[in-house]
Amino acid sequence: MRRYKILLAGSLCVTLLLVVLSADIHAKEEERKAINNTAAAIEKPTITSDWQRYFPRQYGAWKQTKNSHELSDMVKKWPALAIVWAGYPFSKDYNAPRGHYYAVQDNVNTLRVGAPSESVDSPLPTACWTCKSPDVVRLMETNGDLDFYTGMWNRWGSEIVNSIGCYDCHKANSGQLKVGRSYLNAGLTAASLPTFEQSTHQVKRDLVCAQCHSEYYFRPTPNGEATARVVTLPWKDGLGAEDMMKYYNTGSNFPNGKPFSDFENKLSKTPIVKAQHPDYELHLTGIHAKKGVACADCHMPYTQEGSVKYSDHAVGNPLTTVEKSCIPCHRESEAKIMSILKEKYDRKEVLFGMAVNNLAAAHLEAKKAWESGASAEEMAKPLSLIREGQWRWDYAAASHGGFFHAPDETLFIFAKSNDLAQQARVALKEVLAAHGVKNYVAPDFSTKEKAQKLAGWDMASLIDDKKRFKKTVEQEWIRQAKENGILDTEIRDYKDDVSSYYGNAK
Ligand code: HEC
Ligand code: HEC
Ligand code: HEC
Ligand code: HEC
């Protein structure tokens, strides 16, 4: 009897414990559901502040991308950029990336998009907005991709006003991931890779970023009478630097049957392919990706708050969150990690500089060769070497995190680029000699001012036009967006404007 009582009491205790535990599990499950979904519809998902009622933690962290406000002027740091991109808008103005909060503002501010007005269009197409805003997803959903990609950049000035937000990575009202830009799946399919929907959860934690942090080009595509410039990922032959060069060099990949180039360098007349931040592609070649670590693991680490685990949405420099981003996998001290990274960064800077300075010299030497009477036939080999070398330099350079994501690959590509640039210079020496020019020394491009002058820009008037545009056209765009109720007024305050030409960039 006593034994029976003990057993009864024991099983009662267990039952009680189970009830308590299951209530706790239930509560956690509810919390998880609440954190992932909200039944209440957010009427305008492009208004990011409307999400905060339901997802205050993610919203609060997301807003902190505003804290990464420093702007670093890359042309000032590396004047050679103005020479290698001569004739292309990038040589006017190019800055290192900063917080997601600033994507729209920096796109409007850059001298690259020009100073459009009622009578003058921007020199760049609408496609330049693609990676800046959830308003892009809205326009693609309402009017279709082809319409979005038709016309010049200024067409969407009053429509694309909110910087990268929840609706860029999530289904409306939910923490479930999605990609709202169809070219990503098109690129994955061309590369025979699973689409976003077919991918594992961990791969999706990379692919939401790959929507924007990837190499692309604007593919001319007919839209009735007009031509749309459609963002296209050149992944058909693979995702490496060599694969993509092969793709761009193969005429049959393009509607006009000719190898692709974004522009012709104004000084050397080299047809150039401009690389655009292949962060995802370079990351794939690094040890972290090979071990299954995704972008979000470092840039959006899990954070524990009581019983709630959520992702830190302050996407930025993981070295400010080493405790959450790195220490879960590494036992090294923070100081040790920092010193390892500093060494990687410094080595990258040396090879970056060698390659780009040799490329810039080659462009100027080619200019001299043309002026000295060189024929197109004589120039074919050196120009082809410049094209190949510059593609590789730009591929490694445009991915600002490459020195860490994939240090071997980054240094390897810079080394190849530098070799090709040197070969071009040797070939040019021969061409110059054949036309009686010996010991030619390219003009000095050691400061931003000198280099942009050589590139042929009248910077003072470009900047004047831009400042006028900002006081007039931009203000009108903001007014219209407010009137149409599409501007998230809680977030954009337009107060802290930073740009290379206001003199407040680094
Ligand atoms: C750049 C892409 C991106 C943006 C912008 C973004 N998220 Fe997320 N979000 C993610 C990723 C990646 C995860 C992790 C998903 C996973 O592993 O299930 C996530 C997870 C979530 C979750 C699930 C719980 C958690 O924290 O892991 C919620 C809820 C969420 N996000 C809400 C938001 C809200 C609200 C915004 C806007 C204020 C936002 N997100 C902006 C990429 C993004
Ligand atoms: C909708 C396009 C888009 C998506 C999606 C996106 N990014 Fe970005 N990202 C940008 C742009 C544009 C910038 C540069 C903003 C600027 O300089 O004004 C940027 C900047 C950054 C920076 C530099 C931040 C700083 O403070 O210096 C990091 C790091 C970054 N992104 C990582 C990520 C990661 C990780 C993901 C996925 C979780 C992601 N991004 C998703 C477009 C995007
Ligand atoms: C193993 C951790 C890790 C992973 C995985 C990772 N990153 Fe990074 N990322 C870093 C670190 C560390 C830096 C260097 C930060 C610094 O020194 O400025 C960085 C730098 C960057 C930068 C340059 C920021 C700047 O302002 O110069 C971008 C953009 C970026 N990462 C995007 C991504 C994207 C997109 C992915 C996935 C395709 C990714 N990262 C995967 C850790 C990681
Ligand atoms: C999810 C686990 C994980 C996270 C998070 C992670 N790492 Fe790693 N890291 C690894 C693994 C696994 C390796 C490969 C180790 C090996 O195979 O010896 C590695 C290798 C490295 C290496 C040496 C490889 C190289 O490229 O030189 C460095 C440096 C490094 N990690 C730094 C970092 C930093 C900094 C962070 C945070 C921003 C970080 N890691 C975040 C798992 C992780």
Image (tube, rainbow, N blue to C red):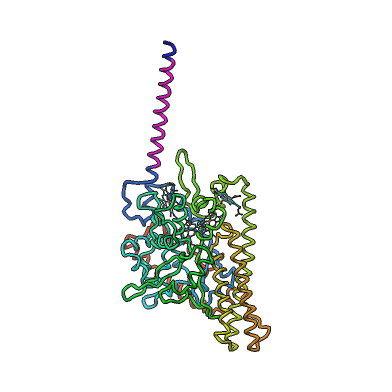
- Residue 363 rendering spot, x and y as whole percentages: 58, 78
- Give, as a single range, the part of the protein colored magenta: 6-32
> Magenta stretch: residue 26 in it?
yes
Out of 405 and 239, give the one closest to the viewer.
239
- Residue 34 rendering spot, x and y as whole percentages: 37, 43
Out of 78 and 85, give the one closest to the viewer.
85
> Magenta stretch: residue 99 in it?
no
Residue 200 against residue 272 in the figure, above or below? above
Residue 258 in the figure: left or right of residue 333: left
Residue 413 in the figure: left or right of residue 116: right
Out of 133 and 465, give the one closest to the viewer.
133
Residue 439 against residue 94 in the figure, above or below? below
- Quadrant where the N terminus is found in the figure: top left
Q: Quadrant of residue 341?
A: bottom right
Residue 109 against residue 367 in the figure, above or below? above
- Quadrant where the C terminus is found in the figure: bottom right
Q: Residue at x 53, y 77 (%)?
A: 86
- Residue 504 rendering spot, x and y as whole percentages: 54, 65
Residue 395 shows up from this direction:
yes
The secondary structure that most of the magenta stretch takes on is helix
